[in-house]
Structure formats: structure tokens, C-alpha cells
Image (cartoon, helix red, strand yellow):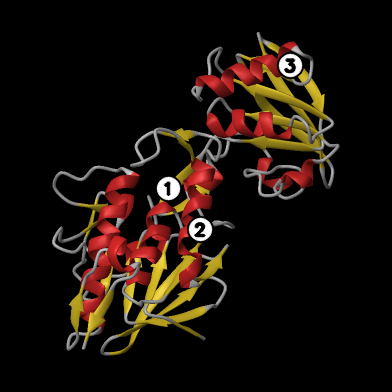
């Protein structure tokens, strides 16, 4: 059993920055995320993609932003439960929730902050017969550890940042890479497209555009993929097929927690981003209100105001005295 002050569901940038703001108020946090690493979409989908709207950074790579946030919250020693989905919550006391994950992990706290981005993420899978048969046996929808693919033959499918970034990243790891995309142009960052083209021209990867995978073949493990291009079927023997078409957001069990939901988003009061359930807040892309903007910057703002309200909810008899960090280095409270 874990106990903390705030359970944060979602370890994306919004959830991570909330740990910092909570830490300034001496509130401890425990983050829960279904993804295997902190950072949310920034880590799983486009770690190499530049972000341009973070104050103080004309440009910063998504992965670097996550690293900076992790460094920023390190002094507050947050706990993490990763690779597990927040399954259910129940009240165990007047001001105490117990959250249970799909793997049975239990965490108690008086406050829950839902910062789950667009909800639980599931990989978008191409409509290929028998694809599920080879999941974890040659078909991978995410690259969690590049070393898994060292000296292997890979077929990567996709035209966005994730497919481009991982093709570039794995070019010096894998034995051979074939990148296929069903269109002639890519959706990813221009710099990434240019790097992929350079790798292709140098003979370091094979690039097939206006092509798509239509069959997967093998016995117990994936052995080859059939690619259709210009009406012709091409067979490529591979160790791994990695379709990177992004992640599909689903609200998941959160939708069953008695919260007011509007078009798969959680309605909140913009005073403090509280939900209709006392003690439960929603911040970031998962919430909705008039004038909502789905920006990382806005999520930082929402998390900042939310922890102020959370402090008052947990300690109604204590006076919160906010102090600028440039003056004291830390905020505190007066009893």
C-alpha cells in the first residue's frame, strides 16, 4: 500500500510539472501511467520532435523537455507506478481515496489529479490479417529499448515523426531497415525527413513510398512481411515489423468514475480545475471548459492553480502563504 498527498494519473509534461508545484507546497505526489516511461506522448510518439511554445526555450526537443522536467522534480522525490493503468477509485474515508491499478497496485491519497492527456493510449494498428498473432513475437508498436533491435532486420511503417525519428535512431543499431509509407510525402519535421532521405541516398536504409504492408507471415514468430507497391507484392524477410501510426486515445476506466464527461473530456471549474467530485481535479488535455486550449503551457498553468486548491482541501485550517521561488527558493505555509 502506497500513501501520498496527491495521486497524479498521467506522467506526461503536465503531470510532471504539477509535481514541482506541489513540492513547493510540501505536498508529495505519486504518478501512475499506463505507458512504460514518464513523458507521455512526448516520450512515446515524438521524443525527437522540436517544441516551440515553451517559455524560455525558442526550441526544445520533446525528449529533452521531459528530461528537464524530471530533473526539476527530482528534489521532491515523487513516486512512480509506470506500465499500469488506473483502474478504479473508491472512498475509504471522508477525505481519502484508494486507487487500484489493473495490476493490483493500491495507492491512497486525499486528492487525485487526472492529468492523463487524452486518456489511456492504445497503438493504432494497421488492418493486416493475423497481426495480433505476432504481437510480442516480431510485431512491436513502440520502441522501448533500442538495444532490442541491435543487428536485427527491421521493417518500419509510418510517415510521421515517430517513424522518422526511430528510423534515424535505429539506423546505427539495426542490421537493416526498410521504411515504408503509403504516401509520397511525410508528415514529420522537415529536418527528420531530410535525414531519412540522406540515409536512403547513402544506402543505409531502404525507403519505399506509396507502399503499405498487407500481410505478415511466420510460424511461432514473424518471419516476413508482404508489402504492396505499384500493384506489385514485395516480400521482405524481417526480424521485426514496427508499425508506428501513433497512439489512439481512449478515456478508459476514468469514464466510469462518476465524473461529468463532455465528448470524452472531463468538465472542470476553471477556478481551480476541480471536477464535480470533491478532491478530484482534471488538468491538461483531458479536461474541457469554455475557451480550452490544448497546449502544454496551459496544462502547466492549470496544474499550478490546482495544487493551490488541493493544499486548501487537504489542510483547510492552515493558511497558505505563497512566496516567489526567486526570493526564497521554496514556498511554504503558515499554521
What residue sits right under mark 1 in the picture?
A: 249
Residue with the mark numbered 2: 70
Tell me the tag on residue 233: 3
Mark with earlier residue (2, 1) = 2
In the depicted structure, whether residue 6 falls above or below residue 171: below
Q: Residue at x 37, y 79 (%)?
A: 5
Pair 3/2: label in front: 2
Judged from the image, the secondary structure of the residue bearing numbered disc 1 is strand
How far is mark 2 from mark 1, CA to CA?
24 Å
Eyeballing the image, is 303 above or below 299?
A: below
Image spot of residue 64 (x, y percent): 53, 44
Question: In which quarter of the view is residue 166 placed?
Answer: top right
**Quadrant position of the C terminus in the picture:** bottom left
The answer to which of 243 and 132 lies nearer the viewer is 243
Q: Position of residue 210 (x, y in %)?
A: 60, 14
Q: x%, y% of residue 255?
A: 33, 62
Q: Quadrant of residue 279?
A: bottom left
Q: Residue at x 53, y 41 (%)?
A: 45
Tell me which label, 3 or 2, sits earlier in the chain. Answer: 2
Task: Estimate the x, y position of residue 41 in percent, counting from the top left.
Answer: 48, 46
Amino acid at each position: 500500500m502506497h500513501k501520498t498527498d496527491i495521486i497524479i494519473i498521467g506522467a506526461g509534461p503536465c503531470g510532471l510539472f504539477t509535481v514541482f508545484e506541489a513540492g513547493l507546497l510540501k505536498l508529495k505526489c505519486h504518478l501512475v501511467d499506463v505507458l512504460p516511461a514518464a513523458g507521455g506522448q512526448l516520450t512515446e510518439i515524438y521524443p525527437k520532435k522540436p517544441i516551440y511554445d515553451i517559455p524560455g526555450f525558442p526550441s526544445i526537443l520533446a525528449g529533452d523537455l521531459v528530461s528537464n522536467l524530471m530533473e526539476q522534480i527530482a528534489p521532491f522525490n515523487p513516486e512512480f507506478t509506470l506500465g499500469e493503468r488506473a483502474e478504479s477509485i473508491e472512498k475509504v474515508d471522508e477525505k481519502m481515496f484508494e486507487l487500484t491499478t489493473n495490476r493490483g497496485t493500491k495507492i491512497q491519497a486525499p486528492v487525485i489529479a487526472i492529468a492523463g492527456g487524452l486518456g489511456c493510449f492504445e497503438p493504432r494498428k494497421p488492418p493486416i490479417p493475423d497481426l495480433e498473432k505476432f504481437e510480442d513475437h516480431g510485431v512491436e508498436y513502440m520502441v522501448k529499448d533500442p538495444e532490442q533491435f541491435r543487428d536485427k532486420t527491421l521493417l518500419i511503417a509510418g510517415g510521421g515523426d515517430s517513424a522518422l525519428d526511430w528510423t534515424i535512431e535505429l539506423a546505427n543499431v539495426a542490421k537493416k531497415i526498410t521504411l515504408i509509407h503509403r504516401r509520397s510525402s511525410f508528415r514529420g519535421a522537415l529536418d527528420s525527413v531530410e535525414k531519412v532521405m540522406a540515409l536512403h541516398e547513402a544506402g543505409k536504409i531502404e525507403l519505399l513510398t506509396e507502399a503499405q504492408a498487407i500481410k505478415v507471415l511466420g510460424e511461432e514468430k514473424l518471419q516476413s512481411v508482404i508489402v504492396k507497391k505499384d500493384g506489385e507484392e514485395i516480400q521482405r524477410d524481417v526480424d521485426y515489423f514496427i508499425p508506428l501510426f501513433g497512439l489512439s486515445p481512449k478515456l478508459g476506466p476514468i469514464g466510469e468514475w462518476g465524473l461529468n464527461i463532455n465528448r470524452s473530456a472531463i468538465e472542470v471549474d476553471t477556478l481551480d480545475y476541480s471536477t464535480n467530485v470533491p478532491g478530484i481535479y482534471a488538468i491538461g488535455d483531458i479536461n474541457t471548459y469554455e475557451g480550452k486550449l490544448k497546449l502544454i503551457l496551459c496544462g502547466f498553468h492549470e496544474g499550478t492553480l490546482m495544487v493551490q486548491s488541493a493544499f486548501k482541501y487537504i489542510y483547510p485550517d492552515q493558511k497558505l502563504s505563497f512566496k516567489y521561488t526567486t526570493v526564497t527558493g521554496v514556498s511554504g505555509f503558515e499554521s
